[in-house]
Image (cartoon, rainbow, N blue to C red):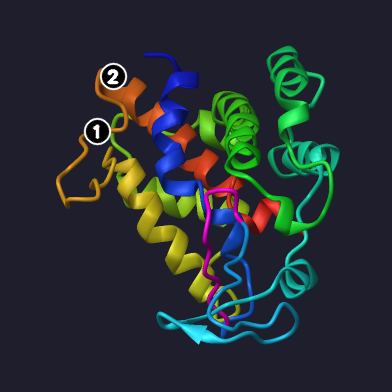
Amino acid sequence: MTFKLKINLLALFVLASCVEKQPETTKLEFNNAGGKPASGGGGSTGGGGSSGGGGVVVGEAELDKNIALKTFNQYNMSLSKVTGIDPTTPAISTEYGLIKNSLPGEHGATNFTPFNQIAMVRLSAVYCDAFITNDAAFKAVDYATISAQAMTTKLLERFVGARSDANSVLYDKYNADLVKIMNNDAGKDENGADIGMLVPVATGVALKQNLSKLACTAVLSSAEFTTL
C-alpha cells in the first residue's frame, strides 16, 4: 500500500475542513456535496440568515465575505514556506502539475468542491512526505519509541506554535484528531462501527513515519493553511 493510496483514507478526516474557518458564532449548513450553503428555510443570502437545525444558514455573499481560499499557486507556495521544501523538487513539481487544475482557481468559497479539497490533500501529502524524510528535526526523531502524543505535539509546535491562550482552541482541536491518526485509528463509519487502521500493513519505525506523514498532511490540508 503506497503512501499516495493511504491519503485516500486520510480524506475522511479533512474533506470538509475548508469550510470550518468561520466566525465562532456562525455554523454553516450545506445542502449538497458541492459545498454550496443551504438557501432554504427563509434564510437570507446576505448577512445573517435564518436559524435551523441548531445552526445559521449563511448565504453565498456572506460565505465569500468571511472565507477566502488560497488559489493553486498561493497554496503551493504556502506549503513550500512552512515546510522548507523546494517546490521544484521532482516529486512535488510532478504532483503539482497533475493536480494544478483541480486546486482552487479563485478565492471565493462558494465555488469550493470536494475535488478541490482532495487535490489539497494530495499536494500537502507530497510536501509532508519530503518534510518528514528530510527535515533535520524530524529525521532525528526516534520513531521506534516516540509516542502518538509526543509526535502530535512536535508537529503542532512546528506548524501551529506552542499551545497558548491565543491558540488553545485551535491547538486542542488539532491535538485530538492528530493523536487518532498517530494511533492508526481510521475512526468509525456512519453506523458507529470501527473502520479499522489507516495504515494496515506497515509496522514499527515505518508505521510511525507513515503515520507522521499523514498527521502532517491533515494539518497542512486543513482550513488554517488552505484559506487566507
SS for callout 2? loop
**Image position, residue 135 (x, y; %):** 62, 31
Query: In the figure, 55 relative to 126: above or below?
Result: below
Q: Which residue is mark 2?
A: 202
How crowded pointer 1 is (Cα within 10 Å; few <14, some 14-19, many 20+) is rated as: some
Of circles 2 and 1, the one toward us is 1
Left or right of 12 in this view: 86? right
Picture quadrant of residue 136: top right
Q: Secondary structure at mark 1?
A: loop
What's the residue at 67%, 87% (across, down)? 48
The image position of residue 226, as x and y in percent, is 69, 50
Query: For residue 64, what is the image quadrant?
Result: bottom right
The region drawn magenta spans 26-35
Other-residue count near label 2 (Cα within 10 Å), few / some / many at <14 / 14–19 / ≥20: few
Q: Position of residue 207 (x, y in %)?
A: 32, 25
Name the residue at 78% across, 36% down: 76
The residue at the far left in this view is: 193
Name the N-terminal-most of marks 2 and 1. Answer: 1
Reading the image, the residue beneath label 1 is 197
Instruction: Note whether 219 is above or below 109 in the view shown.
Output: above
Which amino acid type corresponds to the residue marked 2 in the rendered image?
A: Ala
Residue 225 x %, y %:
67, 52
